[in-house]
Image: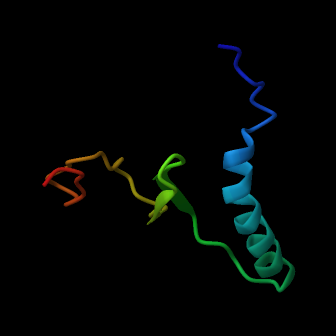
Amino acid sequence: MTEAPISTPPQAYMDIIETLIDKARVFLEAGEKLQPMAFVGNMTTKQVVPVMIQTGSQRPVCADDPVSGVGIGG
């Protein structure tokens, strides 16, 4: 399997993020700030969960972290 260069994301990825980039541009041009976000998902099922990133934390947050209350388990 041949890997695409990192500068050329797959079209399925671009189809998802192009709308986000367009919206972000509108907010920035209006003088608004953006909230750091991560989008965790599956391109095959097209299911995506937005996750707000909390900046300024002195401690990294990991999956199934009992201290932060963040977890991926059931």
Point 30% across, 45% down: residue: 62
> In the displayed structure, would residue 51 be above or below residue 41?
below
Point 80% across, 76% down: residue: 28
Between 2 and 6, the one lying in front of the other is 2
Q: Quadrant of the C terminus?
A: bottom left
In the drawing, does residue 60 fall left or right of residue 30?
left
Give the percent coordinates (x, y) of residue 37. 54, 63
Point 80% across, 70% down: residue: 22
Residue 54 lies in quadrant: bottom left
The residue at the far top in this view is 1
In the drawing, does residue 45 fall left or right of residue 4?
left
Give the percent coordinates (x, y) of residue 24. 74, 71
Between 36 and 45, the one lying in front of the other is 45
**Which color scheme is applied?**
rainbow
Between 21 and 13, the one lying in front of the other is 13
> In the displayed structure, would residue 54 be above or below residue 60?
below
Point 54% across, 48% down: residue: 43
Q: Quadrant of the N terminus?
A: top right
Between 66 and 10, the one lying in front of the other is 10
The residue at the far front in this view is 45
The residue at the far bottom in this view is 30
Give the percent coordinates (x, y) of residue 9. 74, 38
The residue at the far right in this view is 29
- Labels in figure, total: 0
Give the percent coordinates (x, y) of residue 13. 67, 48
